[in-house]
Each structure stands twice: as C-alpha cells, then as structure tokens.
Amino acid sequence: MQIEQNISLKPYNTFGIDARARHFAKFSSTNELAELFDTKYSPEEKLPLIIGGGSNILITQDYNGLVAKNEMLGIEVVNEDAQHIYVRSAAGENWHRFVVHCIENNYAGVENLSLIPGNIGASPMQNIGAYGVEIKDVFHELEAFSINEKKVQIFTSQDCEFGYRESVFKRKYRGQFVITSVTFKLKKQPDFNTTYGAIQQELEQMNVQELSIAAISQAVINIRQSKLPDPKEIGNAGSFFKNPTVPKKQFENLKKEFSAIVGYQANEDEVKVAAGWLIEQCGWKGYRQGDAGCHAKQALVLVNYGNAKGSEIFELSTRIMKSVFEKFGIVLEREVNIL
Ligand code: FAD
Ligand code: EPU
C-alpha cells in the first residue's frame, strides 16, 4: 500500500472540490487499514479520515492529515432461512452495484434505493434512504474496526441506533470506527413498495404489466435522473439539508399563512416539512453566485458548477439557512458532512 503526499481530493469527492490531503492512501484489507492507523503522523495532524465514494462530504479546507479511501471488495451470501438471504458486502463496494447484484439474483429489499451514489461502508453512517425505504429496513449487522481498540467489532441494528439520516457513527462514535463490511437481510419474496412519491405514476408511464423489483428499480432510476444532477456533470452531494421536523401546531400555523407548504405526518405530534419547498419559496432555486449554486430542478441540492471552493458552498448554505429561518421560523440542519 502506497501513502502519497499532497494529493488533490477533486477526483475523490462528488462536489468536485479541489482541496488537498497532506497524505492519501487506498486500503483494501483490514490489515492495510490497521497499518494506516499504526503509522506515526506529526502531532499537529488530524486523525485519518476514511472516505468511500466522497458523495456526502463538503471539503472546506485542505486536510492536514491522512485521507484513506476504502477499497475493500467482495459480495457473498453468508446465510439463508425460509424467507431471507443474508448477503455480506465489503465496505468498498459501490452501493448501486450491490443493488444491481441483488436485483439480478432476485434478492428483494433494496430496489427502492437504486442509484444512490457512494459505497456500502458509508450506507449505515447516515442510514441512507429514498422512496420509502431506509437501510435500517434491510440491515442485519456490520463489522467495524475500532480505532482505539485496534480490533473488529460487530454492530447489530439496535447498536447502530438508526434514525432519519442518523446513526451512532455520525454522532457519538464519529471518527472512532471504520466500517469494513455490512450484512443485509434480503427477502426471497418481494414486498413491493410503490406508494412513495411518483413511483406508481412512473410505473404506469413505463407501461409495466407485471410488477417486479427490476421494474421498481428502473422507475426509481428514472425519477432520480429527472431531478437530481449527475455529479459527473455538476458537482453535488445530493440533499444538502435534512427535511426538518416541526411540531404539528407550528405546521398548522404555517399552513394558515403559506397554504401550499409541503409536509408529511412524521409521527403523532410532528410533521416533516419538505426543505426543498422552503428553500424554493425563499427564492434560491436556480440561484448562482460564481460557481456555487442551488440546483434549478431541486432546491435541496447545492451545486458546484466547476471551480467553487468548499467554503463558498458552505457560505451559500448559511445564507439559505438564515433566510429560511427568517421567513418560516424553521432551523435547517445540514445533512452533508462538513470537513
Ligand atoms: P463519503 O462521502 O465518502 O463519506 C460520508 C461520511 O461517511 C464521511 O463522514 C466519511 O468519513 C464516513 N465514512 C465513509 N466510509 C466510511 C467507513 N467505511 N467507515 C466509517 N465512516 C465512513 N443519500 C441518501 O440517503 N439518499 C439519497 O437518495 C441520496 N441521493 C444522493 C444523490 C446524489 C446525486 C448524491 C451525490 C448523493 C446522494 N446521497 C443520498 C448522499 C450519499 O450518496 C450517501 O450519503 C452515501 O451513503 C455516501 O457514501 P460515500 O461512500 O460516498 O460516503
Ligand atoms: N419540493 C419543492 N421544490 C424543490 C424541491 C422539492 O417544492 O425544489 C417539494 C415538492 O413538493 C416535492 C417535495 O418537496 O414533492 C419532496 O421532494 P422530493 O420528492 O424531491 O424529495 P426530497 O424530500 O427533496 C428526499 C431525500 C432524498 C431522497 C428523496 C426521495 C432528504 C434530505 N432527502 O428528498 O435523499 O432521494 O426524498 O425519497 O431526506 C439525499 O439524502 O441526499 C437525498 C437525495
């Protein structure tokens, strides 16, 4: 394994931010990972940062330390019972490639999560979700290398404390574990989930006669491609903010003033509000200053048209948060990991 010096991170983050890493390495086994953490770095350096596909990070400054890209590969069936197949994937596998593998083998459960960028290892980090499914719904367990104890530990679903775009790895154990593999519990018989968003409409448009996991996957891909920018063309990290949850009473009051406000019942007492709608109402949709902007088809996505600095995107996000708070009294929270 080679440790390179002073490397541009532009190819390694989907925002396309041209910041530099003091050291950079790619690891493909737990042994190589352990070696990276055994290496002595200068005392002023930051702890090593693990990245996968770089599709949920905003790099606002050069990284004074080691950036290590997880390239651990391998997908295997590890168990099965009457209804389920247990499939373990190494953390460096591409998420969508895993979804395609499941569809080809008729393992159901991840089809609604088609085309989410990034790698398996980061998927539990924020409990990735889309179109009515989150990975907690198909999660069995994961293996993670403890940086302090220098050994691999198993986390069950309960240990991960999954929530909406949340897990222990994003909060209390941040920077303490490197996820090395994830085992998913997939269904032999599919439970089709077509109720969310425009899936049903898209399936009709596709003229699908017989529902299948492959058809749902294609419908999700079509919808995503119609509104989300392809990072190969325009730099972005998907939704920049979370959809905020507000008390029901606050939502009812807002509804009196803004009758078109978009919200979904989150639980008995709270409503989840579409942040994209709030941002659009504040006039940001399609906004551009220099190369930093707010996507013209999806206001929740901030974009880099070419040479924006991470700090410029960050400043734009702060301005958006301020205006949403001033207009609606709602505090937006960034979903993307800020570095
Ligand atoms: P990275 O960006 O490399 O890392 C993200 C964070 O996880 C960092 O803090 C990093 O340090 C940490 N990390 C990475 N790997 C490991 C590891 N092995 N162990 C420990 N920590 C690790 N997300 C959704 O939930 N739903 C969507 O629908 C969705 N759509 C998107 C659409 C687009 C166009 C884009 C660009 C992004 C979208 N995202 C979505 C966000 C992103 O795809 C997911 O968060 C994805 O899981 C990030 O994976 P990654 O490998 O790129 O993570
Ligand atoms: N909307 C607007 N204007 C916009 C964008 C959205 O008015 O510019 C309103 C519309 O009413 C729309 C509603 O917001 O119906 C919801 O929009 P959309 O279906 O595009 O979903 P979202 O809430 O913006 C969330 C996730 C996405 C995920 C989709 C589909 C979050 C933060 N984002 O987006 O995840 O793919 O639902 O399930 O929860 C990501 O996390 O990076 C991501 C892309």
Image (spheres, grey):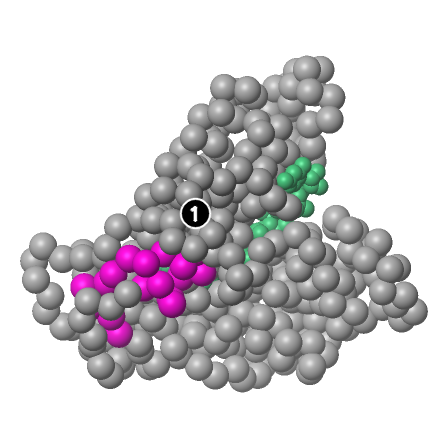
Residue 10: x and y in percent read 35, 63
* Residue hosting label 1: 291
Choose between 74 and 18: the one closer to the eye.
18
Image coordinates of residue 20 in percent, x first then y, are 25, 61
Q: Residue at x 42, y 43 (%)?
A: 290
307 versus 269 height, above or below:
below
Q: Position of residue 251 (x, y in %)?
A: 65, 23
The span picked out in magenta is 9-25
Question: 316 or 245: nearer the eye?
Answer: 316
Question: Is 48 displayed left or right of 102 in the figure?
Answer: left
Query: Residue visible at 49% across and 25% down?
Result: 323
Q: Position of residue 245 (x, y in %)?
A: 57, 33
Judging depth in this view, the residue of 132 and 329 nearest the camera is: 329
Asked if 40 appears above or below 336 in the picture, the reply is: below
Kind of residue sitting beneath label 1: Asp
The residue at 64%/76% (across/down) is 100
